[in-house]
Image (spheres, helix red, strand yellow):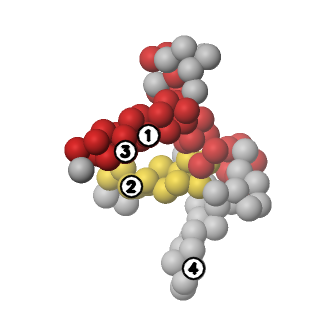
Amino acid sequence: MGIRAAVDSRGRLLIPVEVRKQLGFKEGDSVLVEPVGPGEFKVVLLKDAVERARGIYRHRRNASENVSDELIAERRRESEEADHRE
């Protein structure tokens, strides 16, 4: 059974302290709110969502690869190719 909470006149939902403690939410944390159905939503700590997103493709590259360096090199090649076409 859930814990009762209310939405105030400004549309804010106060998450009860026992729920915040259970979920590890602290003052100042950024969260993502995602609708999942009529009258339902999911709240996820932003830092947790970012970590999960980073892990999605982690297995597709070697640990020694630097994605930023690869992207910069690719953009430089594209720029050089464009210069040669002009």
Can you name the residue that lies furthest to the left here? 85
Q: Are marks 2 and 3 in contact (CB under 8 Å)?
A: no
Name the quadrant containing residue 35: bottom left
* Amino acid carrying mark 3 in the image: Ser
- Vertical comparison of 55 with 51: above or below: above
Q: CA distance from mark 2 to mark 4?
A: 19 Å
SS at mark 3 in the image: helix
Q: Which residue is mark 2?
A: 35
Looking at the image, the residue that sits furthest to the bottom is 9
Q: Are marks 3 and 1 in contact (CB under 8 Å)?
A: yes
Whichever of labels 2 and 3 marks the residue nearer the N terminus, that label is 2
Nearest-to-viewer mark from 2 and 3: 3
Amino acid type indicated by mark 4: Asp
Q: Residue 52 at x, y = what percent?
A: 54, 33
Residue 18 in view in this figure:
no
Residue 16 percent location from the top left of the image: 68, 60
Label 2 crowd bin: few (<14), some (14–19), many (20+), radius 10 Å: few
Q: Nearer the viewer, mark 4 or mark 3?
A: 3
Dot 2: element: strand
Determine the secondary structure under disc 1. helix
Using the image, tell me which numbered label, if any, was put on residue 76: 1
Residue identified by numbered label 4: 8
Which amino acid type corresponds to the residue marked 2 in the rendered image? Pro
Helix, strand or loop at label 4? It is loop
Of residues 14 and 2, the one nearer the viewer is 14
Residue, disc 3: 79
Relative placement, left or right, of 82 versus 33 is: left
Q: Nearer the viewer, mark 4 or mark 1?
A: 1
Q: Which mark is residue 59?
A: none
Q: CA distance from mark 2 to mark 1?
A: 41 Å
Q: Amino acid at mark 1?
A: Arg
